[in-house]
Amino acid sequence: MFVVWFNMYPGDQESRWPRGIFTDTRVVQTWDEPKAAGRWFMSHLSDLRPSRGGIGLPQPEGALWDAYLLFDRDAMWNATPTTILSSGSSVLRTRQKLADDLQYAINRVR
């Protein structure tokens, strides 16, 4: 899992980012001050077609944030990523869909 943090609200800053929120060692977190990841995904939303649907996208802020993109285990990154299972925003509002779709992905590999 990759978690990308950046400044979207007044007061958001790298020194205040909650690094300890994810304790699983498989989670990779990074701070993205220029919002490069969020801007890239925002500009490519029309290319991202989740097979299990998406909730709450797009966003008007110019960068995709407070959102999740769940990729299948065979996802490939070429010009745009492939095999996206689902997406949602805000993460808190769509957490049940994320949990359901994550369980679906886990069950597919068993």
Image (cartoon, rainbow, N blue to C red):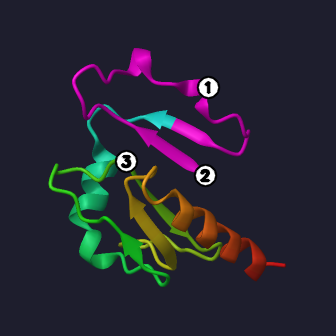
> Which quadrant of the figure contains the C terminus?
bottom right
Count neighbours of disc 2 (C-alpha within 10 A) and say few if under 14, some if 14 to 19, many if 20 or more: few
Alpha carbon distance from label 2 to label 3: 15 Å
**Residue 17 inside the magenta-drawn segment:** yes
Amino acid at dot 1 = Gly
Q: Is residue 64 left or right of residue 21?
A: left
Q: Quadrant of residue 98?
A: bottom right
Q: Quadrant of residue 20?
A: top right
Instruction: Choose mark 2 or mark 1, whichever is in front.
Output: 1
Q: Position of residue 18 (x, y in %)?
A: 51, 25
- Sequence order check, earlier mark of 2 and 1: 2
- Residue linked to disc 3: 66
Extreme residue in the right direction: 110
Residue closer to the observer: 17 or 79: 17
Q: For the point 44% across and 72% down, which residue is it?
A: 81
Amino acid at dot 3 = Asp
Task: Tally the numbered discs.
Answer: 3
- Residue linked to disc 1: 20
| SS at mark 1 in the image | helix
Q: In the rendered image of this protein, does residue 15 appear above or below residue 4?
A: above
Q: For the point 53% across and 67% down, which residue is it?
A: 97
Residue numbers of the magenta segment: 1-29
Q: Is residue 47 left or right of residue 77?
A: left
Alpha carbon distance from label 3 to label 1: 17 Å
